[in-house]
């Protein structure tokens, strides 16, 4: 088992070999106030939803977190923000935190959220890995920014668009294979000269190249589960889920949500 759903909140709780002082959560569509295509826990301030409603959704979630998340403006690049600096809305696609109770956050609606922690519980990170950022090296940049031996890191892959439905053009396959010939194993040919891409496998390959071998998760498809997940590829106009990770300084509001793999 790589994740459980907390019945009281609708949140996904990763089950992985992170140290006990590390907390991680991933939202679903459940528990919010948004309506229409954004129903209901839309956390994306730039999604087109009413900003007041998004703020109210974030306030609901904030009760489970030790501090306001270090929200970032994502651009499908490789910039890694230092969440400890407290810079609001930094232009980045990943963030790293070493201070207690500083919450790293990424927004997703088909792209892959990657959560990282070192086994001593000294540093955590959250990564927004769409195909562009993944291909450009956002995972490698994040591992480097964590400044610990990569072999001491553990990773968890959250919900994303699945390999059975994620159709891409040949330029995507060529871009990945140009950097690593092994990436060809993550693409399946389609009769229309397109390819089906396996984002979790591509992330696992990049993590392995960066020296991270302990990787779990990656089994939930956002596109195929409209009841639980937003999907930009499926719906176009839609909300955003969020993945959070932090180093807990005390029991905290989410202490009952145990991230340890049982």
Image: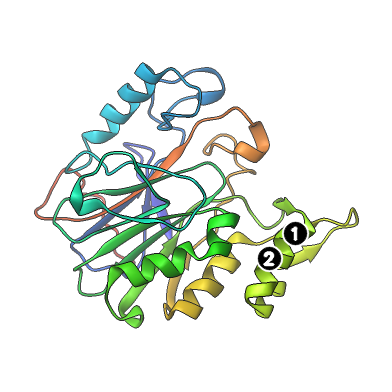
Q: Nearer the viewer, residue 43 or 21?
A: 43
Residue at 41% x, 67% y is: 141
Task: Indicate the position of residue 171 as horizontal and vertical percent values.
Answer: 75, 59
Identify the residue position indicated by label 1 in the image.
171
Q: In the rendered structure, find residue 65 and report the number of the disc placed on it.
A: none
Render colour scheme: rainbow
Circles 2 and 1, Cβ within 8 Å, touching? The answer is yes
Residue at 56% x, 23% y is: 37
Residue at 20% x, 68% y is: 121
Please determine whether, in this image, residue 242 is positioned above or below residue 214: above
Q: What is the crowding at mark 2: few (fewer than 14 residues within 10 Å), some, or many (at least 20)?
A: some
Q: Quadrant of residue 17?
A: bottom left
Left or right side of 135 for 167:
right
Q: What is the crowding at mark 1: few (fewer than 14 residues within 10 Å), some, or many (at least 20)?
A: few
Q: Quadrant of residue 44?
A: top left
Question: Would you say residue 255 is visible in this rendering?
Answer: no
Please determine whether, in this image, residue 41 is positioned above or below residue 120: above
Task: Indicate the position of residue 195 as horizontal and vertical percent values.
Answer: 78, 59
- Where disc 1 sits, the SS reads helix
Identify the residue position indicated by label 2 in the image.
175
């Amino acid at each position: 088992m790589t994740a459980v759903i907390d019945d009281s909140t609708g949140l996904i709780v990763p089950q992985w070999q992170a140290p006990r002082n590390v907390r991680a959560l991933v939202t679903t569509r459940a528990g919010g106030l948004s309506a229409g295509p954004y129903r209901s826990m839309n956390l994306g301030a730039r999604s087109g939803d009413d900003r007041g409603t998004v703020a109210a959704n974030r306030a609901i979630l904030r009760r489970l977190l030790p501090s306001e998340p270090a929200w970032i403006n994502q651009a499908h690049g490789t910039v890694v923000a230092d969440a400890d600096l407290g810079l609001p809305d930094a232009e980045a696609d990943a963030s790293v935190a070493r201070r207690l109770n500083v919450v790293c956050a990424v927004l997703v609606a088909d792209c892959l959220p990657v959560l990282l922690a070192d086994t001593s519980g000294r540093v955590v990170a959250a990564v927004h890995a769409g195909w562009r950022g993944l291909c450009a090296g956002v995972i490698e940049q994040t591992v480097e920014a964590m400044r610990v031996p990569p072999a001491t890191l553990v990773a968890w892959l959250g919900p994303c668009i699945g390999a059975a439905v994620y159709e891409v053009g040949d330029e995507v396959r060529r871009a990945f294979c140009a950097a690593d010939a092994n990436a060809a194993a993550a693409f399946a040919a389609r009769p229309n000269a397109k390819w089906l891409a396996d984002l979790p496998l591509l992330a696992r390959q990049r993590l392995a190249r960066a020296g991270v071998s302990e990787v779990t998760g990656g089994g939930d498809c956002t596109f195929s589960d409209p009841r639980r997940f937003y999907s930009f590829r499926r719906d176009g106009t839609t909300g955003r889920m969020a993945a959070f990770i932090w180093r807990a300084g005390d029991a905290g509001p989410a202490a009952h949500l145990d991230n340890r793999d049982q």
